[in-house]
Image (tube, grey):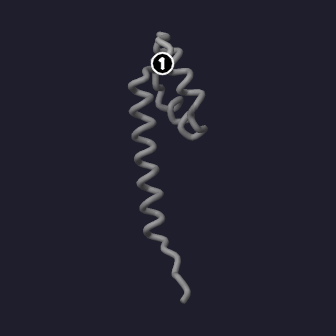
Amino acid sequence: MMRCAIRENEAMTLRRLYKGLKDVLRREVVFQGVSTLDQAYTLVKDYTLVTKNQWKNRQDSYSIPIRS
């Protein structure tokens, strides 16, 4: 919490991050056994990037024909 100049330990910050994740990401963090903020951030970033690209590719491959 930089704005308030409050320092908290990494475990507390990791718990706050964990509580704010969507269920899918939260399960993945637990499954992977993440124990540091760096690991959590990397996992969430990579997971989001992979799923975003899969969704984008899926949309591209299923185009809906337009009736004229």
Residue at the spot x=44%, y=56% of the render?
Answer: 54
| Image vertical order of residue 31 relative to residue 14, above or below | below
Q: Quadrant of residue 61?
A: bottom left
Give the residue furthest to the front.
3
Image quarter of the C terminus: bottom right
How many numbered circles are shown?
1
Q: Is residue 40 left or right of residue 21?
A: left
| Image vertical order of residue 52 relative to residue 8, above or below | below
Give the x, y percent position of residue 40: 44, 28
67 vs 21, nearest the viewer: 67
Inspect the image, locate mark 1, and give the three-letter code of the amino acid beneath it. Arg
Residue at the spot x=46%, y=63% of the render?
Answer: 58
Give the x, y percent position of residue 43: 42, 34
Give the x, y percent position of residue 52: 45, 51
Q: Is residue 59 left or right of residue 21?
A: left
Give the x, y percent position of residue 22: 58, 38
Residue at the spot x=55%, y=86% of the render?
Answer: 67
Residue at the spot x=40%, y=40% of the render?
Answer: 46
Label 1: which secondary element: loop
| Image vertical order of residue 44 relative to residue 66, above or below | above
> Which residue lies under the disc numbered 1?
3
Give the residue furthest to the bottom.
68
Judge the density around disc 1: few (<14), some (14-19), many (≥20) Cα neighbours within 10 Å.
Answer: few
